[in-house]
Amino acid sequence: VIRLIGGEMPGWNEDRPPAGGALYGYLTDQLPAGSRVLVAGPHDPALIEALAARTAVTCLVRSQPEAERLDARGLDVLCGTLTKLTDADRWDAVVALDGVGRLCSVEGPQYDWTECLRALRNVLLPGGLLLLTVENELGVHRLVDPAAATVALTDDAWRPLGEFDDSRPGSPARLADRLATEELALDWLGAAWPSPAAPTLVATADALLTGPAGALSAAAASAVASAYADRAVLSDPRRLAAAAVRAGLGPELAPAWLVLARLAPAPPATGAPETATPLRLPPVLLGDGPPAGPLPTGRLLEELLLTACLRHDLPAVRGLLTGWMAAVPDAGPENVVVAGETFTKLDPGVPPRADVLRCFATTLLTGGYAHPWPAATDLRTLTAILHAAAGLPGDQPAIPTDEDPPIPNSRRDQEEQLRSLRRLLADAEARAEVYEQEIAKRDAELTKARVQIAAFGGSFGYRMAKLGYGVARKARQRLRKRA
Amino acid sequence: VHHANHFYGHAHVLAEYCGLDPEHPPRIDGYVQHGWNVVDGLGIGTPYLPGRPIFVWSEQTRRRAWSMGRRQATVIGAPFLYLLRFAAPEPEPATRAGTIWYPFHGWEGQQVKGSHGRQIDEIMATETGPVTFCLYWNEYHNDKIRAEYEKAGRVICHGYRGFQWRDTDIRFLHNQLGELRAHRRVASNRLSSAIFYGAAAGCEPAVYGDPMHLEREDLAVAERIRRQWPELHGKHPEPETARRSALAELGDGYLASPAELRLLLGWSLDRAAVPA
């Protein structure tokens, strides 16, 4: 059933995909069965249907064609702009995993972030739950984006405020404050990677502070690695995400925050039993839910190798390469955790690879990292050196020719490659000049030597004849000059 | 690339370590540091080809080379340490006695200034056992200087360093190792490669006496060396501290495996050997 509440957009289709993914699916699965839920804004139909199977779902969308598609699936739909939503109807829970940016249509007032939050709170029943995604305008995804949020690129960017919407919270602490102002108690707040639209890693501030920093920073790097494969970026988001987590700035620089907040319950009627059991969400969500076992301790091999290379600590580099090749030679360095002498796969589900040393050599070269073999500027030589430094047999390993796994296409790396190629070219030109001078010098020596060989080689008669001919020629030249 | 790679038979030692013919080492794709120094590892006046690696002994030297604009410095450790890896082990029990003394030496371009006589007096007053004087070929072939030392003890020379690939004594380091192992102490009036080699070969090192000086020498460098490595200076430095310091300067712990070294020097087996 579609109810048009006003301000709907008849010919409009959202031009970016809706919020979705397995991790969001896990979160909505935690809402109590049988409750009445408002799903506000565009969400993946699969997620809505899974939720509708357990709860009574009402959707709120601004696009009329989308409302019709939801209706065709048998869902209850409110179609229109958020400002037309009244508190005539209220819900046990509001799900806004797409954030609040696509709730107002072009018609009518344009609510800022806080006004949207208030409008959603107003339709919650006392004690009702709000599941909300808040994009961080200073998140890693923004910092590496070649395009600014304030550049209107898509049809839905009719008011691209970006970081200039001062009502946006800006940090996890301010987010908690804004919720409190709206009488929403924060039950749980998680930092999310790699994007607000489809996070694959969520961790609470406490987990990021007290959990295994190596595994969590590796998980953040791995989450952005898959999301940014082959995508144009300013700098490598894997390093930025991991460095932020290691530095204790994970929540502040995560692309989004997910919150579960609760409206203050109505004062209990005397004698009525307390029925609401608080909803507990886990501290870490990875992929489609909480990780199967405890996260491994230790540091990511790739980061340890890069550190040892940057320090020019050859014994450490050789030790790490040797340990890696002995323990898990088919796992990329971004999927190996090192604790003391133990090398373990971070995610055993990643398919094995034969070209891991070549891949690390690529990382060193394309990332422009300083390393102990600066004269090895081509991939083949550097791979062979890594192979030997790892203590593997054979001088020239058969280097697999498979494609490297796609990595973020970073402007900074491109700059570095340009700089490095210019340096190689300048060195080659300087060498060519030295060689040319050397050749000229040797040519002169050779000419002189040939004259001497001709003068002193051969038979006595030949030499005398030649000498006589030379004298005769000089005499003739002199005579000509005089003439 | 450069004839200094063959000085003291360095290229030959490295070739033997890599499993190649030690008599005919292939051309090295870069510059091997031929002696201990406090600059970028290259000798003075070496015509450097841009982009080619300098193979230095220690990480400290690499840092210094980087600061001097040498971007391709690669740490491999001193060739003498590679010799220790494959040379026959020291006979047991060790029969070490006395001191091997290396007077500060000159070369083709600069002669040493100072009194050898006064130096010998101080040495003989300090050393308790027999003293072997090891002269550099430059002083060894000077009859007057050699005679002065011969009056005080045994005088030897490890051989000729070589020049332009000619007359190189390719067993120079082997001779030196043999002599070092016959002595309990190694000493000189200047901190130099020989002191580091001696410490690595098991001698107690000492640096004392009139440091003398080279013609046109910048003495600030010699003073800087004394300030930076006090643990190696004096008549009887603490042996263990001195040895640790010496091994660090030689790049102990940084030595490459034969396979890795072959690749670094441009000697990989699939490449046609280029004569030096």
Image: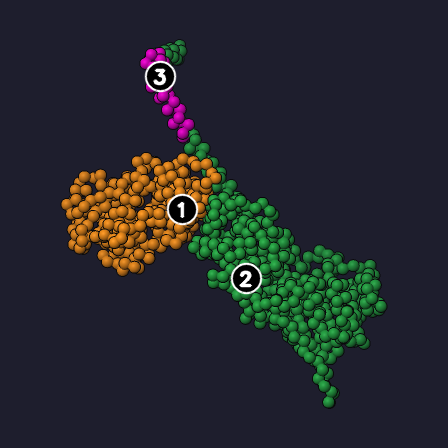
Chain colours: A green, B orange
Q: Are marks 3 and 1 on the same chain?
A: no
Residue highlighted by disc 2: A243
Residue located 57% across and 46% down the image: A400
Q: Nearer the viewer, mark 2 or mark 1?
A: 1
Q: Which residue is drawn at 70% across and 61% down?
A: A160
Nearest to the observer: residue B154 or residue A204: B154
Q: Distance between the residues labelled 3 and 2?
A: 78 Å
Mark 1: secondary structure: strand
Tag on residue A255? none
Residue B150 picture location, percent across and down: 16, 44
**In the image, is residue A82 above or below residue A304?**
below
Inter-mark Cα distance, 2 to 1? 33 Å
Q: Which chain carries label 2?
A: A
x and y, in percent, of residue A399 in the image: 54, 45
Q: In this view, does A423 lie to the left or right of B44?
A: right
Give the quadrant of the C terminus of chain B.
Answer: top left
What residue is drawn where x is 67% and y is 76%? A279
Q: Mark 3 points at which residue?
A: A458
| The magenta stretch spans residue B167 | no
The residue that disc 1 covers is B55
Label 3 crowd (10 A; few <14 / some 14-19 / many >=20)? few
Q: Please give left or right for residue A1 compared with residue A168 in the image.
A: right
CA separation, marks 3 and 1? 48 Å
Chain where mark 3 sits: A
Proximity of marks 3 and 1: CB atoms separated by less than 8 Å? no
- Identified by mark 2, the residue type is Ala
Label 1: chain? B
Which mark's residue is nearer the viewer, 3 or 2?
A: 3
Q: Is residue A448 magenta?
A: yes
Residue range corresponding to the magenta coloring: A441-467
Find numbered disc 2 in the image and state the secondary structure of the residue it sits on: helix
* Residue A172 visible at all: no
